[in-house]
Image (tube, coloured by chain):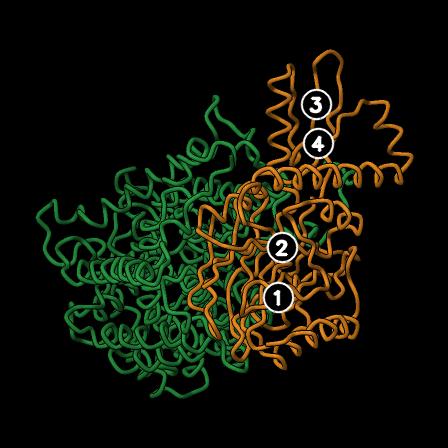
Chain colours: A orange, B green
Amino acid sequence: MTTLFFATDVHGSDICWSKFLNAGKFYGADKLILGGDMTGKAVIPFVHQGGKNYRITLLEQVFEATNEDELADLVKRVRSRGYYPYMTDPDEIAELEKNPDRISEIFMAEVLKVVQQWMDLADKKLDGTDMKVYCSPGNDDADEVDAVIRSSRRVILVEGQVTQLDDHHEMIASGWSNHTPWDTHREENEDQLAVRYEAMTRQLKDPRNAIFNIHVPPYKSQLDEAPELDKDLRPVLAGNSMKPVGSTALRESIEKVQPLLGLHGHIHEGRGSSRIGKTLCINPGSMYEQGTLLGALVKLGKNKIENYVLTTG
Amino acid sequence: MSNLFVRKATGMVRSWSVFDAFIYAFFSINFVTLGFYAFSQMYYFGGGMINALIVSAVFLVFEIIVYASLISVMPRSGGDYVWMTRIFGGGIGFILAITGWWFTLWLWTPVYGDMFRQVVLVPILGVLGMQDTAVWFAGTGTPLFVSSLITLAFVSLVIFLGMKTYARIQKFSFYAGVAGLLIVIVLLFTGSPEKFKAGFESNAASIFGSQPGVYDATVTTGTDAGASTPLTGGSMNLVLVTLPWLVFFNLWPNWGATLYGEVRGATDYKRNFSGMAWALGTVTVLGIVFFLGVARTIGWDFYMQANGAWWNYYWGYVTDVPPLPVWPYPAMLASFLTNSRAVQLIIMVLMSFWWFGWAGTLFLSSTRVVFAAAFDRLLPEKVAELNDRGTPVNAMLLMVIPAAIVSYLYAYNVGGFISITLAATQAIAIMYFGTAIAAIVLPYKKKELFEASPIAQMKVFGIPLITVAGAIFAAFLGFLLVEWMFDPWLNTGGEGAGLYGISFKNTNSIIFLLVCYGLSAAIYYGFKSYRKKGGIDLDKVQAEIPVE
C-alpha cells in the first residue's frame, strides 16, 4: 500500500514549504505531491530610511525596523505570508513608479530566487531518504519556474507527463487551468485543456487505477465553488454568491476515464472531497497566508482507495 | 500595500461592498422576525425596552470586534469550528460547533415555523378574508407543526436552489421588507390613539371575528397576564435582567461573517467591522424609532397588554383564547390604522419578505459544519455527497428529519418542550463563548500568526484589541449563561418557568442540552476511534507539522 501526501497552492510561503517537506515523515507518507501555484503574489518593499532603519507597509500597516534583529523579524513576517521582501530606498521607489517593467523584473527575480532556495532546501532535507516530491506548477507560476525545478535532485517536474508512482498507480499531472479573470501564466480554452488531458490519458496503461493531479478542479464538483465577481473583480453580494469555476474538460475526462483519484487545488476556499462516478476528487484548499499547510493523506490500495483524510498542519 | 508591487494572480479580488455586507448582517439581526417575536415575549420585565436595546448594543459591539478580528487573522477558514479547533485542538471545537451550528438549528425550526405563520400566513390569510383558516393557523398544536413543515420545505428549496440564487432573493427581500417597514412606521407616526382604537375594534372583528369591545378586553386580559415592561427607565439591574431575552433578537450580527473573502489589510478589517456595526446600529435605532411609534399611536401599555394576553394563553397559563385570537403582530396592528384591505395586503406582503429573505439560511451554517466534519472524517463521507442535481440530499436529511421530530415535540408541547425556546440561543451563545476565549488567547498561543495579520497593531494600552474585546464579550456571554441557568426569578422563590424558562430546574432544557452535547461528543470520540482502527490518527492530522 502506498500512502501519498498532497498539498497545493502554497504561494511562496516558506513555512508551508518547510512543513510540506516534513510532512512525509510526520504523517508516514511515501510520496509527496505538490499541486500548482507555488509562487507568491506580492513583493513588499523594505524602504531604507538611513542607518539601520527600514520601513515597510504590510497589510496596510506600517512597521519600522531600527536594528538587524527587528529587520530579520520583519523579513520573517513577510515571508510567512508568502510575500517577497525587497530591500530598496526612496530613490529607487520613485524610479520604479516610472518604470513598471522593472518591477516585473524584480518580481521574477524574487520568485525564482525563492524557488531556488526551496529546491536547495528539498535536496538537503530529503537527502538520504527515498522521498521524492512530484511537482507541477500551476496557472499562477511563470514558465521560468520549470527550469529551476528541473535543477533539483529531489523535486521532479511532472507537468504533462505520466508518472509511475508504484506498481499499480500511474499519475498524470498538469497545472494549466481554464481562463480566469486574472489572465495568469498557464491558462487556455477548455478545448485545449481537453487535448492536453487526452494526450496524457491515452498513455495510461491502467486508467482506472490512475491519479489525476490536475490543478484546476472539475466543474461543478463542489471543489470549485468560488465567490462570484463583478466586472471590477469585486465579490458580489458580499461574497454570499458562490459559483462553480472548474474545468468542464476535466470533468468530461474524469467521467470518461473514471480514474481512482483526482487531486486538485486552485480554489483556496474549495476544501473538500466529492465523487464523480467512482472517482474520488479532493481539493485540500489553502491557508498559506496563515502558515497552515492544508493537505490530503491518501492510502492507495490495489483498485481502491483504502483510506483518506484532509489534514490541517 | 501599493498595487505597484502586487502581481496579477488568481484570487486577487477587490474588496466587497460594505453596503452588501451591511444588508446581510442587517437581515441576520432580523428586526421583524426575531425582533417583533422577542419583544412580544418580553412583556413581564421591569427594565425599559429602549434602555435594554442600547445597553445590549454596547456589549455586542465587542462581539463584532471579536469576529471581525478573527476573520482578519484566519479568513475563509469556516468560522467558529476552525478557529476553536486551531487554537484549542480538536475535541472542544467540534463539540461546541456541531451543537451550536447543527443540532441547535433543529430547535430553531419550530421557532422559524411559528414566525412564518404569525408574520406571513395569519395576517395575509386574514386580510384576504379567509378568517377561519387564519385563526386556525394561529392556534396551538397542529397549525404550528404544519407551519414548521412548510418552513422545512422552504429551507430545503433554498438548499436546492443554492446560495447564488438565494442571495439575490435576499437582496430583493431587503428592499421589499424595508419598504413595508417604512409604511408601518409612517402609519405609526401619523396615526393617533383614538384612530388606532377604532381601527383595532373594526379590523379585529372583521378580519379575525373578535367580539365588540376587543380593545378593552385585551387591556384586561393583558393586565391579568402581568404585562408590565416599560418603554424606558428601570434600574440598571432591571435592564440587565432583560438582556438574556433580548439577545434572542440581536446576538447575530456575525451570522454571515465567515462568508467574507480574502482579507488583504487593515482596510478589510474595517470593512468587516463596518458592515456588522452599521447593521447593529441601524437595527438599534430602528428599534427605538419603532418603540416610540408604537407608544405614540398603539400605546405602549396596550402593546404590552396585547402581547401578555397572547403569550399567557399560548404558553398554557390560561385556557381561554385571548380577545384578539392571533399574535398581535405589530405590522398588522399598524395596518389597522387604515380600513383599506388593498393597503393592508400590500403591507403584509411586503413585510412577509422579512421572513422569506431571512429564513432560507436556517440550515446554511449547518450544511457547512456537516460538510466540514465529513471532510475531517468525523462523519461518514456519504453525508457530504451530492445527487446528480448537485443537492446535498443526505446532509439535508440529517437536518430535516431531526428538525421535524423536534418541531413535533415543540408544536404539541410534549412534556413542556415549548418552554425551551431560549435554549436555541443558549447553545449558540455557549459556542460563541468558546470562540471569545479563543480570541482572547489567540495573540499569545498563535503569536506569529497574529503578528503577521492585519490587526497586529491594533492595541489598547499595549494589549491586543482582540484580547480586550474577547474578554468583554466573554464576560457578557458569561453573564447571559449564568442568568439563563440560575434564573433570577428562582432566587426570589418564584414558581414556574422563571424569566427565561431554561434554568437548571427545567428538565427539558437540561435534557436537550445534554443530548446535544452528548451526541456531539459521541460522534467525535466514536469516529476518532473508528478512524484510528483504519490507520488514521485524527489528532495527528489536525496537529501542526514542525517547520524545522
Query: Please, what secondary structure does the residue beneath circle 4 have?
Result: strand
> Which residue bears the numbered disc 3?
A55
Q: Quadrant of residue B322?
A: bottom left
| Crowdedness near tag 2: few (<14), some (14–19) or many (≥20) residues, C-alpha within 10 Å | many
> Which residue bears the numbered disc 4?
A85
Picture disc at residue B329: none
In three-dimensional space, the C-alpha distance between marks 3 and 1, rounded to whole angstroms, equals: 47 Å
| Whole-percent x, y for residue B101 in the image | 38, 60
- On screen, A37 above or below B452? below
Say what amino acid the circle numbered 3 marks: Arg
Q: Residue at x 62, y 66 (%)?
A: A171
Picture disc at residue A171: 1
Say what amino acid the circle numbered 2 marks: Tyr
| Crowdedness near tag 4: few (<14), some (14–19) or many (≥20) residues, C-alpha within 10 Å | some
Q: Are marks 4 and 1 on the same chain?
A: yes
Whether residue B190 can be seen here = no
Q: Quadrant of residue A178?
A: bottom right
Whether label 2 touches label 1, CB < 8 Å: yes
| Whole-percent x, y for residue B465 in the image | 48, 32
Say what amino acid the circle numbered 1 marks: Met
- On screen, A11 above or below B20? above
Of the residues under marks 2 and 3, which one precedes in the sequence? 3
> Which residue bears the numbered disc 2?
A134
Whether label 3 touches label 1, CB < 8 Å: no
